[in-house]
Image (cartoon, grey):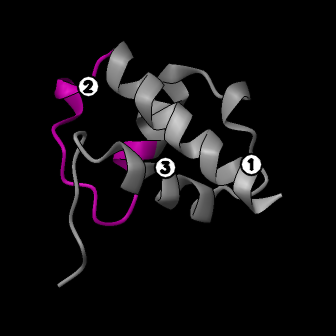
């Protein structure tokens, strides 16, 4: 059974986003696009209707941290 996570797991989502999109600068991704990208991650089980700008911003910052660490 694959690892499952939802919107409340911004750090895990940031890690998963960096692994799936290693060459993408998170600051260049629109929240509408990021929402779609997150909901399509393997293991993501969150309700697509339960996200908001604050959640997406937290994910963006977690992803940015992973992106910067990978440089």
Label of residue 68 in the image: 1
**Range of residues picked out in magenta:** 38-52
Give the residue at x 73% y 27%. 28
Residue closer to the observer: 67 or 45? 67
Sequence-wise, the earlier of marks 3 and 1 is: 3
Q: Position of residue 5 (x, y in %)?
A: 22, 57
Location of residue 29 by image quarter? top right
Which type of secondary structure does the marked residue at label 2 adopt?
A: loop
Location of residue 10 by image quarter? top left
Label of residue 28 in the image: none
Residue closer to the observer: 31 or 12? 12
Magenta highlight on residue 44: yes
Kindly identify which residue carries mark 2: 51
Q: CA distance from mark 3 to mark 1?
A: 12 Å
Give the residue at x 60% y 21%. 30
Residue closer to the observer: 24 or 11? 11
Q: CA distance from mark 2 to mark 1?
A: 25 Å
Left or right: residue 26 compared with residue 52: right
Kindly identify which residue carries mark 3: 14
Of circles 2 and 1, the one toward us is 1
Give the residue at x 24% y 74%. 3
Sequence-wise, the earlier of marks 2 and 3 is: 3
Left or right: residue 63 compared with residue 51: right
């Amino acid at each position: 059974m694959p690892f499952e996570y939802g919107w409340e797991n911004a750090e895990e989502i940031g890690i998963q986003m960096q692994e799936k999109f290693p060459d993408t600068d998170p600051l260049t991704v629109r929240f509408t696009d990021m929402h779609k990208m997150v909901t399509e991650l393997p293991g993501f089980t969150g309700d697509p209707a339960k996200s908001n700008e604050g959640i997406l911003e937290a994910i963006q910052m977690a992803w940015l941290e992973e992106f910067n660490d990978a440089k």
